[in-house]
Image: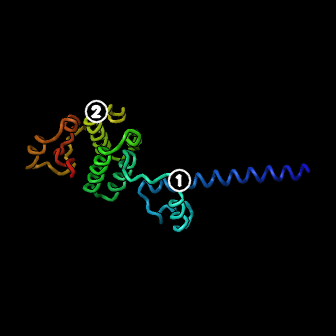
């Protein structure tokens, strides 16, 4: 009888481990998807097949988020900078800003969580300044991570230097110019 009770107890523990592991796998797959990874890449990283990853995404109880957070944005910028595509990195930032403007209170909190560094201080500063400005425009307190010191040298992320420098500098919001970032305000206008 003691053997049978022990066997039943160990089986119950094993079932709990399986449930716990399954929940963690769901969370990992969702985290990979939110980070913008393809199903194929998630499958490779988790040691699963792509059809299994697809099924896990469909089964997931949590709805998939369709908007970028500051964390997602920093990670996407990091990837684009590694590819040498600063133009697309800026487009990602502008897309995230557009997303932020439409978020409700709960989503806004998730959006504002501190991101990891992009690997480039200029881009970290631009992301922080963009988020701080967007918060101010929405009447929200900007998170502490958005407080930055000015860059050591001026930076024109959209290439507005040279002959266009005076025009760019004249149309750069104070949120950026005080940090040594010169970017025409029209870069952030989306329709």
Q: Alpha-carbon neighbours of circle 2 within 10 Å: few (<14), some, or many (≥20)? A: few
Label annotation for residue 130: none
> Which one is in front in this view, the residue at disc 1 or the one at disc 2?
1
Q: Secondary structure at mark 2?
A: loop
Q: Is residue 25 left or right of residue 134?
A: right
Looking at the picture, how far across and down is residue 163, in whole percent? 8, 49
| Residue of label 1 | 61
- Please identify the residue farthest to the right as the structure is shown: 1
Question: What residue appears at the point 33 percent right and 33 percent down from the top-left corner?
Answer: 142
Q: CA distance from mark 1 to mark 2?
A: 33 Å
State how many labels appear.
Answer: 2
Label annotation for residue 139: 2
Q: Is residue 178 left or right of residue 72?
A: left
Q: Secondary structure at mark 1?
A: loop
Q: Alpha-carbon neighbours of circle 1 within 10 Å: few (<14), some, or many (≥20)? A: few
Q: Is residue 61 above or below residue 39?
A: above
Q: Is residue 172 left or right of residue 129?
A: left
Q: Which of the two discs, 1 and 2, labels the residue nearer the N terminus?
A: 1
């Amino acid at each position: 009888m003691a053997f049978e009770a022990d066997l039943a107890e160990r089986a119950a523990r094993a079932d709990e481990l399986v449930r716990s592991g399954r929940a963690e796998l769901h969370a990992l797959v969702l985290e990979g998807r939110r980070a913008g990874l393809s199903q194929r890449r998630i499958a490779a990283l988790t040691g699963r097949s792509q059809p299994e990853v697809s099924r896990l995404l469909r089964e997931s109880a949590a709805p998939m988020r369709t908007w970028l957070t500051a964390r997602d944005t920093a990670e996407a910028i990091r990837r684009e900078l590694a590819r040498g595509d600063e133009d697309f990195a800026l487009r990602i930032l502008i897309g995230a800003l557009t997303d932020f403007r439409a978020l409700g209170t709960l989503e806004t909190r998730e959006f504002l969580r501190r991101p990891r560094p992009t690997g480039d201080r200029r881009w970290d500063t631009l992301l922080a300044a963009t988020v701080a400005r967007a918060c101010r425009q929405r009447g929200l307190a900007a998170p502490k991570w958005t407080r930055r010191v000015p860059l050591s040298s001026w930076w024109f992320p959209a290439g507005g230097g040279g002959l266009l420098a005076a025009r760019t500098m004249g149309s750069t919001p104070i949120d950026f110019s005080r940090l040594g970032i010169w970017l025409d305000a029209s870069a952030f206008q989306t329709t």
